[in-house]
Image: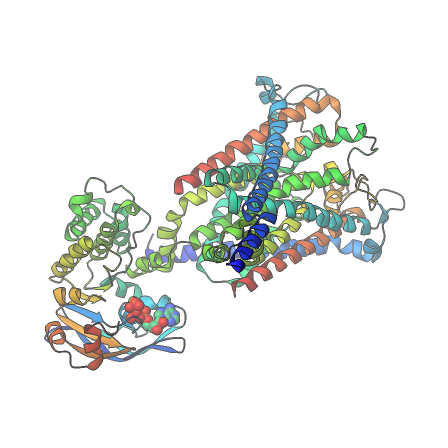
């Protein structure tokens, strides 16, 4: 092949790949809007202000407010649990662990990051869930169990991201603090963490995004009630869980089908929002 | 003299109250304990996933289809389905991901970076909805291997391209200039110098992507997988069983009687993950 | 001068609004070694990198005036920069081996000029490595990764890579400043030999180096060429004040 044909071919391939990425984002948005259109039209505002989600009753009810709140609540609680522990572990690995030790623990986390969520869910369902009955909790699958699952699911990504941002702080900054007589813990938590703050905030946002989109763990462990739980041991259902569990049994094109797409639209809005916040944090940090 | 003594006494007193050395040790030990507890919890999760299922492994388990309402037989169709789906989706996503990674790294296009970041954050179940709407329904692929593979490919695309971007971006500018100084065009610098030099990281990320693809459940429930397939797939348009969806269906709607099969499947999945990631890490280490 | 190969005429170079080279005028004689000297940041690299238009890759870089190569302005619109760069090779300050084998590093450039025949490539690889005084050291391990060579060997490999495609001019931007004295000595000897076949322009901070190898020297200060002459003359009696100060170590 001659040089300039090759050049043209390669440029074309690059253009095609960019076009695919761009049309994927637009395509996903357009599809979600298009398919949820009839739900908006026929159910209207009730979709978002009602807690009544009875899609297979006659007449059916499509109020997903409780599930939206559940998704957000799980995200908030999940992040609140996982972030502090991830932070402490990252501080240990960054400042105290010996290189080999750090490498090994990091490796464990990396392997965990690869474990499919259905496996985490199954293990907890088999080995932890039965314990609830023994202590007299009526629902063996509930918010608490889902949070435990989410903890295992997100602790690798959260810890790794925080560790990376701590590690990227220049050594001189820490030395300057140490030279003033600060003990290491103080240096790491006050000085290093401050310098790494954008990275840590980014880690939190991405962790939250991971939780809000997680499906199988909340579906298998959450217990599946489309109500707002009153306590940690109540069962609950999120938007993602509703989509994955109900869609396979739904007639394509029905109002139920369309409402589930509306749930998907809410989800993608959340995730886009999280990603935009993440981009903004990182960009401000660069300047 | 007097003053001096006072000073030193006071300073020892203060030092005793909060001896910085002790305090430093305390925080170190506390952090270490926390870290080790969680590392141990994670390891036990691995053991609980891997070990109890291994005893159900035998030839039949890997070569038979499930039978008698999941109380006997094996997981062959699910194994086959997972392998087919993973390979097919990677065959689509790897070349595309490399190209996209090149665009991210070598062309300063802010909006493409934005698009890829958004893609990387979209929940997998939403990819499933999209695949269901576009591939299964609009394009008439129904619930099929092809629809599932395309959906998975789209999902791992940002994973692959971001990683290609990062390694390629880290190549020093001087190296590019040296190639240009020989009279190379941009596309030649990219495809004949940069791509070969990130080969290893392309291999690494391919395995990482394989690990992702093989464990995905939600998008496959919507686009490719059925609870039980009477026949093995005959074409790309056949529905399939896969390991993760099989495990999901077993956990969601079967009780004790199918527990053994779920455990056996879990062990297979976790073994896959360990093998695939170990290979990926091995490639990465060699690079260092 | 008898045989002028490059002539720079009223040449200005800018990074955005910053003028890095001011009204440069000079002539480069064929098969001679011309050294460019001057304090840090005075625009030496900018001038050098303008001659093969490698600075086109720097965003916001622009030029005014002309650089004539064989009497044709390289900043003309018709100029094919890719073939220009093939005729004017370059070696950088830090060695830039591509992350491939020793052999492939050189074959890379050859393939760009359309050499596809295996035998010819092999011959050229050997020829250029011999010229770069590296052949004896690497002839048994041509498949080894170029990254595993020492710094001095890497730099000689980069020189071999540059000469393999037989340019007419080779630009050197402080080629030895990242190397140890022994490697430096080897490369200086090499550059002197290369001058028999190629025209050489070298940026250097090292006065001794300029004295040892160059025929002409031009001296830059704050973007301007303040003095140019035969090296021996400049070093013996610099006419310009800043040159005197630089040579006596007062600025630099
Ligand atoms: N990429 C760039 N963008 C903006 N300004 C630049 C860039 N490269 C160089 N400059 C500026 O142009 C001026 C000349 O730089 P140049 O690199 O040509 O100097 P030099 O003489 O080679 O210095 P040195 O001896 O340190 O290599 C300097 O003031 C420098 O700050
Ligand atoms: Mg310079």
Quadrant showing the C terminus of chain B? top left
Instruction: Identify the residue shown where x is 33% and y is 48%.
Output: C99
List x then y, in percent, for residue A77. 72, 47
With B139 as the anchor, is A240 left or right in this view?
right
In the image, residue A102 sits, relative to residue B1, either above or below, namely above
Q: Is residue B213 visible?
A: no
With A242 as the anchor, is B206 left or right in this view?
left
With C130 as the anchor, is C21 left or right in this view?
right
Q: Quadrant of ligand 2?
A: bottom left
In the image, residue C152 sits, relative to residue B259, either above or below, namely below
Instruction: Identify the residue shown where x is 53% and y is 44%.
Output: A93
Of residues C175 and B112, which is closer to you in this image?
C175
Of residues C188 and B109, which is closer to you in this image?
C188
List x then y, in percent, for residue C80. 30, 67
Query: What colouring does the structure picture have?
Result: rainbow
List x then y, in percent, for residue A149. 68, 38
- Number of dots carrying numbers: 0
List x then y, in percent, for residue C175. 24, 60
Q: Residue furthest right?
A: A58
Q: Is residue B260 visible?
A: yes
Q: Quadrant of residue B203?
A: top left
In the image, residue A246 sits, relative to residue B12, either above or below, namely above
Of residues B26 and C178, which is closer to you in this image?
B26
């Amino acid at each position: 092949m001659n040089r300039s044909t090759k050049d043209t071919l390669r440029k074309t391939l690059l253009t095609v790949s960019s076009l695919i990425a761009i049309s994927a984002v637009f395509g996903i948005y357009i599809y979600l809007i298009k398919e949820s259109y009839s739900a908006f039209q026929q159910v209207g505002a009730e979709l978002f202000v009602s807690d009544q989600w009875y899609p297979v009753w006659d007449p059916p009810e499509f109020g997903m407010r409780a599930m939206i709140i559940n998704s957000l609540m799980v995200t908030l609680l999940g992040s609140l649990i996982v972030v502090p522990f991830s932070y402490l572990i990252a501080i240990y690995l960054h400042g105290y662990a010996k290189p080999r030790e750090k490498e090994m623990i990091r490796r464990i986390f990396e392997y965990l990051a690869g474990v499919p969520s259905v496996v985490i869910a199954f293990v907890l369902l088999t080995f932890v869930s039965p314990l609830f009955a023994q202590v007299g909790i009526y629902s063996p699958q509930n918010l608490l169990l889902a949070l435990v699952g989410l903890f295992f699911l997100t602790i690798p990504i959260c810890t790794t991201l925080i560790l990376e941002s701590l590690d990227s702080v220049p050594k001189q900054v820490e030395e300057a603090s140490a030279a003033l007589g600060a003990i290491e813990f103080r240096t790491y938590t006050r000085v290093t963490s401050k310098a790494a703050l954008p990275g840590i905030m980014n880690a939190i946002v991405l962790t939250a995004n991971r939780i809000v989109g997680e499906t199988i763990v909340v579906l298998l462990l959450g217990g599946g009630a489309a109500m707002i739980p009153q306590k940690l041991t109540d069962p609950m259902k999120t938007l993602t869980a509703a989509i994955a569990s109900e869609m396979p049994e739904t007639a394509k094109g029905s109002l139920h089908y369309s409402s589930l797409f509306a749930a998907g639209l809410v989800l993608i809005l959340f995730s886009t929002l999280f990603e935009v916040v993440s981009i903004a944090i990182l960009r401000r940090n660069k300047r | 003299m007097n003053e001096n003594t006072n000073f030193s006494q006071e300073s020892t007193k203060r030092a005793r109250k909060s001896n910085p050395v002790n305090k430093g040790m305390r925080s170190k030990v506390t952090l270490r304990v926390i870290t080790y507890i969680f590392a141990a919890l994670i390891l036990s999760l691995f053991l609980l996933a891997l070990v109890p299922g291994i005893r159900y492994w035998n030839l039949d388990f890997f070569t038979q289809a499930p039978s008698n309402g999941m109380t006997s037989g094996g997981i062959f169709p699910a194994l086959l389905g997972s392998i087919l789906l993973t390979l097919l989706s990677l065959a689509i996503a790897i070349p595309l991901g490399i190209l996209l990674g090149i665009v991210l790294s070598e062309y300063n296009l802010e909006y493409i970076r934005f698009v890829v970041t958004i893609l990387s954050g979209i929940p997998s179940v939403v990819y499933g909805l999209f695949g269901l709407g576009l591939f299964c329904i609009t394009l008439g692929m129904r619930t099929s291997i092809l629809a599932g593979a395309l959906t998975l490919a789209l999902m791992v695309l940002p994973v692959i391209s971001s990683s290609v971007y990062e390694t390629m971006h880290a190549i020093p500018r001087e190296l590019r200039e040296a190639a240009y100084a020989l009279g190379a065009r941009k596309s030649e610098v990219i495809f004949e110098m940069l791509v070969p030099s990130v080969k290893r990281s392309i291999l690494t990320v391919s395995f990482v992507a394989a690990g992702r693809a093989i464990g995905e459940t939600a998008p496959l429930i919507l686009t490719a997988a059925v609870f039980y397939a009477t026949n093995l797939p005959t074409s790309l348009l056949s529905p399939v069983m896969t390991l993760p969806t099989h495990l999901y269906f077993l956990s969601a709607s079967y009780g004790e009687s199918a527990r053994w099969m779920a455990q056996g499947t879990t062990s297979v999945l976790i073994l896959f993950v360990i093998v695939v990631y170990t290979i990926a890490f091995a490639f990465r280490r060699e690079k260092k | 001068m008898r045989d002028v190969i490059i002539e720079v005429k009223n040449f200005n170079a800018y990074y955005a609004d910053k003028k890095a080279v001011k009204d440069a005028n000079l002539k480069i004689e064929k098969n001679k070694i011309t050294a460019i000297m001057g304090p840090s940041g005075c625009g030496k690299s900018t001038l050098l990198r303008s001659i093969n238009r490698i600075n086109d890759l720097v965003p916001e870089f622009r030029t005014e005036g002309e650089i004539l190569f064989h009497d044709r302005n390289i900043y003309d619109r018709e100029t094919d920069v890719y073939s220009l760069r093939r005729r004017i090779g370059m070696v950088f300050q830090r060695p830039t081996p591509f992350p491939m084998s020793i052999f492939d590093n050189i074959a890379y450039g050859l393939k760009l000029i359309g050499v596809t025949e295996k035998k010819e490539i092999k011959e050229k690889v050997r020829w250029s490595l011999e010229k770069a005084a590296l052949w004896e050291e690497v002839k048994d391990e041509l498949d080894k990764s170029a990254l595993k060579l020492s710094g001095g060997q890497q730099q000689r490999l980069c020189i071999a890579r540059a000469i393999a495609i037989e340019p007419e001019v080779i630009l050197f931007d402080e080629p030895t400043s990242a190397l140890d004295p022994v490697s430096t000595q080897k490369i200086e000897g090499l550059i002197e030999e290369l001058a028999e076949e190629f025209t050489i322009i070298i940026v250097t901070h090292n006065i001794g180096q300029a004295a040892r190898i160059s025929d002409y020297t031009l001296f830059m200060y704050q973007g301007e060429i303040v003095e140019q002459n035969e090296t021996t003359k400049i070093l013996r009696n610099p006419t310009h004040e800043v040159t005197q100060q630089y040579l006596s170590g007062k600025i630099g």
